[in-house]
Image: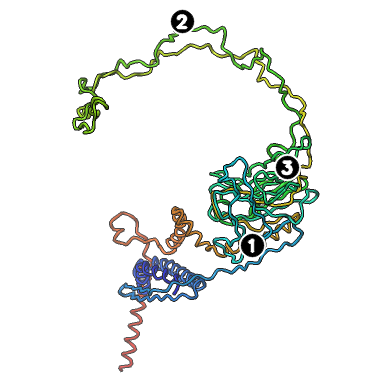
Amino acid sequence: MGQGFQVVALCYLRGMSGMQQLYHDFACFLRGCGGERRELRRNMELKWLCVTLLALGILAVHAHDMDEDNDADDVVDIEDDLDDGIEEVEESKSETSSPPPAPKVTYRPPVPTGEVYFAESFDKGTLDGWILSRAKKDDTDDEIAKYDGKWEVQDMKETKLPGDKGLVMVTRAKHHAISSKLSKPFVFDTKPLIIQYEVNFQNGIECGGAYVKLLSKTPELNLDQFHDKTPYTIMFGPDKCGEDYKLHFIFRHKNPKTGKYEEKHAKRPDADLKTYFTDKKTHLYTLVLNPDNSFEILVDQTVVNSGNLLNDMSPPVNPPREIEDPNDQKPEDWDERPKIPDPDAVKPDDWDEDAPAKIADENAVKPEGWLDDEPEYVADPDAEKPEDWDEDMDGEWEAPQIANPKCEAAPGCGTWQRPMIDNPNYKGKWKPPMIDNVNYQGIWKPRKIPNPDFFEDLEPFKMTPFSAVGLELWSMTSDIFFDNFIICTERAVADDWASDGWGLKKAADGAAEPGVVGQMMAAAEERPWLWVVYILTVALPVFLVVLFCCSGKKQPSAAEYKKTDAPQPDVVDDEKEEEKEKGEKEEEEEEEDASEEKLGR
């Protein structure tokens, strides 16, 4: 049988005494046991109700086990003898039954359902279309300046989708750079920009990034020399070092007056990002930029940050209209002091500035047994001068000092001194009290003047066009997995691509994960205190149901009433009923005797 019958057998053993009591009560009910009959009748009803509930529970457990474990081959033999009150349960050893196979999720490479500027799933198994950088970083030692980090197309280490490949940054502690051309340059006009891709930190992440750069379209763009100084339009993606978890969104804004570019950083998300870096699961990162300057950042299709390019970037896109005059200077007579010493205050005559803060306690008394003539420390009598001690080089040897053993039993040794206490007459150096400054003018600030560099760009969405996508990274952790890049303008296209890629990974992971009970057991292994919660929420209600269903209030016996002055219950009705039954029985016997006499005649 299944596990349910094993539990039932155990419950049967532990409940044997209760079943024996039920057997005794039933027999007593049939024979009639004096004044206890009415109470027994009530107890019988409650106990039979409990037995009925227990039987229903057994059937439910057995049915549940039969559904979950059809291939189980467990045998439980139960032999019971109610007269002797002995029950033996023998459980045969069973082979471990294999769990039912997880639902199989078949992988199919995602296919764009609309117009895209870039789409890459790496399912061909090659780096065709990608260019490895051969550049060197400036101002860096030659040994570490090269972009010699290794990239490969591989299956994920613990993949649940055979055939689903991705781009893996294989090495650690090296500079990595790889890029690929878009099908056509992206121009910011009247359509949104959507950039989306997947990342899995297969080994966790100590310090490093997994962000993507959208490389600006310039005549000088050479993907073979892609490095950290290559101009980009947008940088987006996760980054972590130490306990600082980031999700970058940076765009380079061109100053319309000077032509120079300045990085604008989105505000930090309010959401906790730690899980995305530590759970070793594949996460989907999405950036949506709209022509009205609004933006959304999503992780696993959930918004974690949003805002507006005009209001939620640092530093702001547009400079202030006014700035502080750099040539303005504070006047020499400007008074910034809100409080000043009272010039009319005079030090009191009895103010003693020379009084010490601490004085000796005159009421202190030297403890009895104090050893005035014994020093606190003495030379160690067991110490010996080292054999290699050279007095000419090391000086005269002296034994090290140890605590005087004679002082251990005494309250103290050496010259006794009175303890120091706070001086009640101490006042310290006198200072005049502070009063409001009638000449206070406030904190001085330079005057405001029009900002000569002011400009107003109300359409920062119209950024520099970009023509390539690249990964330029350094990481102290290897095997970072990238997959399913897409750049498009329609949200539905990005969602369909996510459903066919990341959605399949999520479904496969979900099918392989344990059920609710398995997750609860795994959580309890990590947090043992959860067992207390389980017991309180499951075992306690069951115990209370059994307690209230199967327990009856026991009436005191007649002998117990005799020991006290408590009034006895009215048993007249029971006695009359017994006398009536006895009389009816005697009449039946007399009728039988009369019939036998007639037959004998």
Looking at the rendered structure, the kind of residue marked 3 is: Leu
Q: Position of residue 91 (x, y in %)?
A: 37, 73
Q: Position of residue 21 (x, y in %)?
A: 35, 68
Residue displayed at 76% across by 45% down: 464
Q: Does residue 253 appear in the picture of this structure? A: yes
Q: Residue furthest bottom?
A: 601
Q: Earlier in the sequence, mark 3 or mark 2?
A: 3
Mark-to-mark CA distance, 3 and 2: 69 Å
The residue labelled by disc 3 is: 309
Q: Is residue 44 left or right of residue 477?
A: left
Q: Is residue 220 left or right of residue 162?
A: right
The residue labelled by disc 1 is: 126
Numbered disc 2: secondary structure: loop
The residue labelled by disc 2 is: 349
| Vertical side of 522 occupied by 20: above or below | below
Q: Earlier in the sequence, mark 2 or mark 1?
A: 1
Q: Residue furthest right?
A: 190
How many residues crowd around disc 2 within 10 Å: few (fewer than 14), some, or many (20 or more)? few
Mark-to-mark CA distance, 2 and 1: 95 Å
Quarter that holds the N terminus: bottom left
Q: Position of residue 160 (x, y in %)?
A: 57, 64
Residue placed most toward the observer, 511 or 227: 227
Q: Earlier in the sequence, mark 1 or mark 3?
A: 1
Looking at the rendered structure, the kind of residue marked 2 is: Asp
Looking at the rendered structure, the kind of residue marked 1 is: Thr
Q: Position of residue 583 (x, y in %)?
A: 35, 76
